[in-house]
């Protein structure tokens, strides 16, 4: 994350709507990041596990964060961890 220019603000940020794995900042934008790990591809790629319900939950978490902390620009990302491979998917949804 740091190599990609992100500054981690919070980890495991809990709200009444659920938990965001990471809240970070990059270039003045607050980024809400879901981390998905898979040990094998039997159930697809890690990013495939971020479906409609998970995305809707992250939107509610972001709205809560914006109301509490005054963030204006937000984005959503997914970090895929598959074995030793780590992939950051910016603007994931």
Image: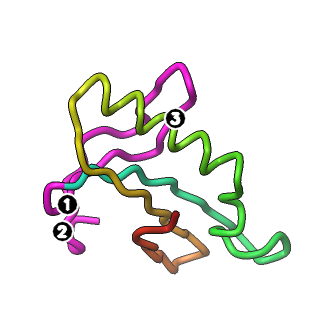
Q: Earlier in the sequence, mark 2 or mark 3?
A: 2
Going by the image, does 2 lie left or right of 36?
left
The verdict on residue 17 being magenta is: yes
| Residue 37 percent across, percent down from the top left | 61, 62
For label 3, the SS is helix
> Which numbered disc, 1 or 3, marks the residue closer to the eye?
3
Q: Disc 2 marks which residue?
A: 5
The CA distance from mark 2 to mark 3 is: 25 Å
**Of residues 10 and 29, the one drawn nearer to the viewer in this rendering:** 29
The quadrant where residue 69 appears: top left
**Residue 60 numbered mark, or none:** 3
Q: Magenta region: which residues?
A: 1-28
The CA distance from mark 2 to mark 1 is: 6 Å
Residue at the image position 52 percent from the left and 78 percent from the top? 84
The verdict on residue 68 being magenta is: no
Residue at the image position 20 percent from the left and 60 percent from the top? 26
| Residue 86 percent across, percent down from the top left | 47, 75
| Residue 62 percent across, percent down from the top left | 41, 39
Going by the image, does 65 lie left or right of 34?
left
Q: Disc 1 marks which residue?
A: 26
| Residue 3 percent across, percent down from the top left | 21, 73
Q: Earlier in the sequence, mark 2 or mark 1?
A: 2
Going by the image, does 30 lie left or right of 21?
left
Residue at the image position 60 percent from the left and 51 percent from the top? 55
The CA distance from mark 1 to mark 3 is: 20 Å
Circles 2 and 1 in contact, beta carbons < 8 Å = yes
Q: Main secondary structure of the magenta part?
A: strand
């Amino acid at each position: 994350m740091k190599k990609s220019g992100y500054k981690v603000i919070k980890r495991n940020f809990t709200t009444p709507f659920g938990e965001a794995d990471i809240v970070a900042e990059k270039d003045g934008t607050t980024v809400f990041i879901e981390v998905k790990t898979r040990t094998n591809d039997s159930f697809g790629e890690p990013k495939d596990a971020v479906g409609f319900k998970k995305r809707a939950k992250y939107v509610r978490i972001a709205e809560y964060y914006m109301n509490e902390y005054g963030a204006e620009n937000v984005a959503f990302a997914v970090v895929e961890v598959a074995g030793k491979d780590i992939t950051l998917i910016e603007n994931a949804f």
